[in-house]
Image (cartoon, rainbow, N blue to C red):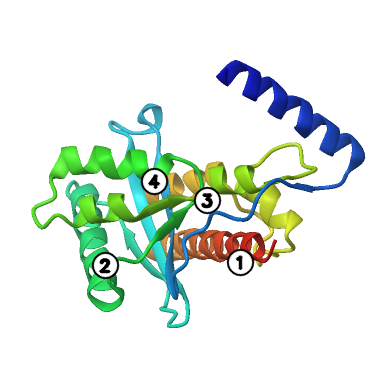
Amino acid sequence: MEVGKAAARILLEAEVLEQNQERVLAPAGTPNFPNYVMFDLEGLPPHLNEIDKVYLWGTQVFGDKPSKFMAAVSGFGPDGDRQSWEEFLQIAKGIFDQYGDIPFIHWASYEKTCISKYKKRYGDPDGIADRVLANLCDLLPLTKACIVLPLPSYSLKVVEEYVGFKRTQEEYGGDWAMAMFIEATETQDKTKRDELMGKILTYNEEELSATWAIFEWLKSR
């Protein structure tokens, strides 16, 4: 049955791509709240680090009462990984304290996977990670269930461009951000390091804005 559904989906996507016309399948199944956290992580895979490491935990509230961009960034010392995890938990706690059980909107499964790994790695003494996990909302499957787009892929970068979102930096992307972070860890020039990290932070902030743009667009469909 599932194989048949997958085959039908492939045929439908090919038809939509050929006709270059989107097809709405169902109303958007997005949660209905006054505010939402857009949530995006930047990380290094194990072959580039001794462990799979999240070096930036990015969050920002959008909606009726928006917040500033908040990021927990790994330091460059031996305790940087743990410290960024603990800082993220503090940020998440502050969000829950102010907004209650607010949805954490993300794109694809990376965020959920990383929170589960870090919970095992460093613990979750106050239950904040569990609370984030319970409030995660993956926008990618919601989008695919709602609409078929005339696009070659459903990556965030492709879909954001389709809905009209524009970035401010000419260079960006997950691989680009990893290269920037590795360069930042290797330089002893503080000015250069701050410049590199500033570009990564701008990239992550725009990832959150792009996710929000897609979320709003999807609700409008």
Q: Are marks 4 and 2 in contact (CB under 8 Å)?
A: no
**Split into 4 quadrants, where in the image is the N terminus?**
top right
Residue at image location 28% in from the left, 31% down from the top = 50
Residue at image location 49% in from the left, 58% down from the top = 200
From what the image shows, is residue 3 above or below residue 148?
above
Query: For the residues carrying marks 4 and 3, which lies nearer the camera in this image?
Result: 3
Q: Position of residue 179 (x, y in %)?
A: 50, 44
Residue marked by disc 4: 111
Residue marked by disc 3: 139
Q: Position of residue 111 (x, y in %)?
A: 39, 46
Q: Residue 217 falls in which quadrant of the image? A: bottom right
Q: Are marks 3 and 1 in contact (CB under 8 Å)?
A: no
Q: Position of residue 80 (x, y in %)?
A: 23, 52
N-terminal-most mark, 4 or 3: 4
What secondary structure is found at the residue carrying circle 4? Answer: helix
Q: CA distance from mark 4 to mark 1?
A: 20 Å
Q: CA distance from mark 1 to mark 2?
A: 24 Å
Q: Amino acid at mark 2?
A: Ile
Q: Which mark is residue 91?
A: 2
